[in-house]
Image (tube, rainbow, N blue to C red):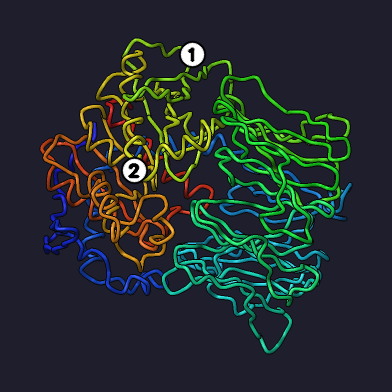
Amino acid sequence: MITAPKNTPAPKAQRIDKKHERFGHTWIDPYAWMKDDNWQAVMQDASKLNADIRAHLEAENAYTEAALAPLSKLKDAIFEEMKGRLEPNAQSLPLPDGDYAYFHYFREGDEHGVYARHPIGNPDKKHIMLDADALAKDGKGYFDLGDVSHSPDHKWLAYSVDRQGAENFRVFVKSLETGEVFATGIDRSAGGLVWASDNHTLFWVERDDNQRPYAVRFKDIFDNLGKVYTAYEEADPGFFVSVGTSDDLASIEISAHNHTTSEVWRVPAFDPTTPAQCFAPRLAGQEYSVHDQGSKSYILTNADGATDFAIMVASQTDTSRETWMPFISHTPGTLILGVEAFEHFLVRLERINALPRIIIRDMRSGEEHAIEMDEPAYELGLISGYEYRTSEIFFSYSSPTTPEQAYCYNMETRERELVKEQVVPSGHDRSNYAVERMEISARDGARVPVTLLRRKDVTANGQASLLLYGYGSYGITISASFRTRILSLVDRGFVYAIAHIRGGMSKGYQWYLDGKLEKKTNTFNDYIDVGHALVKAGWTRSGRIIAHGGSAGGLLVGAAINQAPELFGGAIAAVPFVDVLNTMSDTELPLTPPEWPEWGNPITDEEAFARIRGYSPYENVSDAAYPPMLITGGLTDPRVTYWEPAKWAATLRDHQIADAPILLKINMSAGHAGESGRYDSLKETAEEYAFAVAAVGLS
């Protein structure tokens, strides 16, 4: 069991009441002081954190460390199990580009691995382009690579490095002929890097002072004057900016977007100083992406009521919306997730009834065929390569019991070849496990899909422990893929359940719309209703469910335990977005304006204010018997700032009437994703799973 440590008292946070008034309502935030007034500087340099805040966070960490100390052997055992399932010398699929194939691999013991290439047809002639492990050891503390991008002529490698966890990346360029490395002077990149076809112009996204990716810059990296140019700058703080290339590689493609609206601007890759041209001006509530082939552009969009998206076609010489013509019609319930264009083929990824399929269309004949699989739950995805003029694509397949397989598929002959299969060194016998997909009835009658993974010897007798994972925001769908880590719980008798709740897109785009804004509480209700249904079906019982979610999934966990604390035997909330009302009211925070289409604007919209105030976990903690909780955060996290979990943990402890401890762990040298290393991240998961095992009284 998880108990409070005997010799380390729980931190008692100082209360400094801060009064808020809006729309005739008054509320008090006693822990607003945990937000450092100079938080932007802390993102750049963690040593600048206010001393009182640092002392409190360190006391929280010490308390958590003492509480989890009895689990050290269990944590170490789980870590070794998970490590044993990772192939020490794992290598990604080599993807062809011209005369080379590019890939990433690990040497035994590597945290970050090596980026390499070999000549096509000669895999033994490997050339190491970037040794990420060696690069990480050159500095201290956190290390993450944002992007590793080779130039079109294969002579240069651009890469971006974050050493704080705040997702501000410095950019370097390396000669692949001489090995010389030089800094570019680009120090506030959002990570992604794109080369123009001239092989010396580099595009990147720059962050503003509030950590928002707002502008696309470019420069000639060999220009000694170091002049920086602007391709695009976004004036609306509610829109983020990203940069990439068109499918045919002819354009640098700039996207300005929030969660419901998008706009594409393009620059000729062969003439990067040309002013960017807008493909079609943004319209509120309309999303689109562009995929060029020959003289035409194919547009994936939800325009004209295409809730699950349709594909339109337009001439590249006139891209105004008035010229868009239907190409693939909208089919309700068939969600088009993505499109890739090749010289003679158009490939789309769809999802129907929570299962994906790949559709290939020969643009010369108009003939289509599908790639589908036959397991009850699985994940299927395109592996994006570098080449446009090709008849071969790569796709991946896995299921909760089937390790990932990568296939090369010939779109002309329809032949597939298994070219890579995930290896589990410690062994994996899929016949020991069972996977099933079930649907439960939510309280309003909606049918919610659930994916279950268990050992075959675990039966529905009401005795098993269960980890209930969910997310339910931004349309993100949790796939039914193979996860080696979760086997450490399943092998201990846990049932692993993924609740495909509203707010994701498991059942189409409408499923997402039914879990956002004024319908957001459907997300939380679905999750709780799934838990009750699994109890009723005999897969577990109340008090033996571990709630698990991260980021917006942490909001889900927080809302669920406020509503039904008795259902859960424990809760793991990783970097949880739980201070929703205050965060959505703070226009300086990185994600606030872009997030209003997802949650609503509580500053100007009284209904949104009331709704958010009604479910925000921080505002809705009550005197209750909460289960033991493990809450994590990152000091330099720009997405869910550290003070959200810190404030929430303090107020949970204020209202806890049971003996179960509320544990907070803030990583003082990392951001939203936690530790970036291959094995370091495993240690964090091992600690979470040890907590889960102990919370339900197992070992």
Residue 153 in the image: x percent, y percent? 83, 66
Residue 469 in the image: x percent, y percent? 40, 33
Pick the quarter of the image with the N terminus: top left
In the figure, is residue 596 to the left or right of 61? Answer: right
| Residue drawn at (70%, 33%) of the image | 358
Q: Toward which corner of the image does residue 516 lie, by quadrant? A: top left
Which residue bears the numbered disc 1? Answer: 456
Does label 2 or label 1 sit earlier along the sequence?
A: 1
User: In this picture, is 259 found above or below 354?
Assistant: below
Q: Toward which corner of the image does residue 627 lie, by quadrant? A: top left
Residue 27 can be seen, yes or no: no
Please identify the residue farthest to the front as the structure is shown.
322
Which of discs 2 and 1 lies nearer the camera? The answer is 2
Which residue bears the numbered disc 2? Answer: 518
493, 587: nearer the viewer: 587
User: In this picture, is 173 found above or below 105?
Assistant: below
603, 574: nearer the viewer: 603
Residue 304 can be seen, yes or no: yes
Asked which secondary structure carries label 2, the reply is helix
Pick the quarter of the image with the C terminus: top left
Residue type indicated by callout 2: Glu
Crowd tier of the residue under label 2, counting other residues whose Cα lies within 10 Å: few below 14, some 14–19, many 20 or above: some
